[in-house]
Image: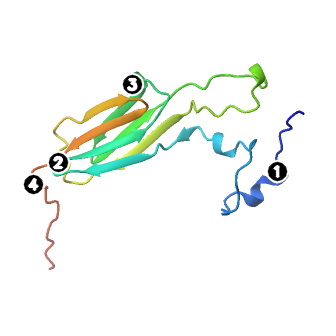
C-alpha cells in the first residue's frame, strides 16, 4: 500500500475557521510552512525574581540570543533548514522544526534592568532569571489641570 498526499481543493475556505472536531491531517503542511515560531513559556514569580522557561529544543546555546532593553525581554534564534528531497530514506513526512523563533516579553517595572539576567540552556529549555527591584519604581506622574 502506498500513501498518497491529499491536499484540499479550496484551502482558503476553512483557513481561519476553527473547529473543535478537526483532528488534523497526517499530510497537512499548513502548520509547518511558517518560518518563525513562538515557543511556549512558563513564568514563575518569587519575592526576589521572575523565573522564565522557554521550550526551544534543537538549538545550541551559541545560536540563541537574549537581550533586555526598554522593558522588553527579547529571545531569538535561527537555524538553517536542512534541504531534504522528498522520499529520501523512506520518509513520508518530516516534522522536525529547523525554523527560527522570536519571542518578546514586556517585563514589569519591578524588574531591575541594571542587574544581570541569569540565563542557562539545558535539555532544550532556556531558563532566564530576572531580578526584582527591592522597591518598584513609581513611573506615575500627576498632571495638573489648568
Number of the label disc, if any, that sits on residue 135: 4
Find numbered disc 2 in the image and state the secondary structure of the residue it sits on: loop
Task: Tell me the crowding category of disc 3: few under 14, some 14 to 19, or many 20 or more residues within 10 angstroms, Cα based.
Answer: few
Please identify the residue farthest to the right as the structure is shown. Answer: 1
Q: Which one is earlier in the sequence, the residue at label 3 or at label 4? A: 3
| Image position of 55 (left or right of 116) | right
The answer to which quarter of the image holds residue 62 is: top left
Q: Which one is earlier in the sequence, the residue at label 3 or at label 2? A: 3
Number of the label disc, if any, that sits on residue 8: 1
Q: Give the spatial CA distance, label 1 vs label 4.
A: 57 Å
Measured as percent of width and height from the top left, residue 85 is found at: 75, 22
Number of the label disc, if any, that sits on residue 132: 2
Q: Which one is earlier in the sequence, the residue at label 2 or at label 1? A: 1
Number of the label disc, if any, that sits on residue 61: 3
Q: Give the spatial CA distance, label 3 vs label 4.
A: 33 Å
Q: Is residue 110 above or below residue 73?
A: below
Q: Residue at x 31, y 30 (%)?
A: 120
Please identify the residue farthest to the left as the structure is shown. Answer: 135
Number of the label disc, if any, that sits on residue 32: none
Q: Give the spatial CA distance, label 3 vs label 2.
A: 25 Å
Disc 1, disc 3: CB below 8 Å? no
Amino acid at each position: 500500500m502506498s500513501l498518497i498526499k491529499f491536499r484540499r481543493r479550496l484551502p482558503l475556505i476553512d483557513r481561519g475557521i476553527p473547529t473543535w472536531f478537526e483532528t488534523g491531517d497526517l499530510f497537512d503542511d499548513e502548520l509547518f510552512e511558517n518560518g518563525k515560531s513562538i515557543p511556549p513559556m512558563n513564568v514563575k514569580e518569587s519575592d526576589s525574581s521572575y523565573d522564565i522557561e522557554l521550550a526551544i529544543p534543537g538549538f545550541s546555546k551559541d545560536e540563541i540570543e537574549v537581550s533586555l532593553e526598554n522593558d522588553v525581554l527579547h529571545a531569538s534564534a535561527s537555524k538553517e533548514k536542512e534541504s531534504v528531497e522528498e522520499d529520501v530514506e523512506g520518509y513520508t513526512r518530516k516534522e522536525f522544526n529547523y525554523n527560527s523563533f522570536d519571542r518578546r516579553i514586556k517585563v514589569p517595572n519591578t524588574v531591575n534592568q541594571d542587574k544581570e539576567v541569569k540565563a542557562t540552556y539545558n535539555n532544550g529549555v532556556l531558563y532566564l532569571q530576572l531580578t526584582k527591584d527591592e522597591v518598584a519604581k513609581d513611573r506615575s506622574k500627576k498632571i495638573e489641570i489648568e
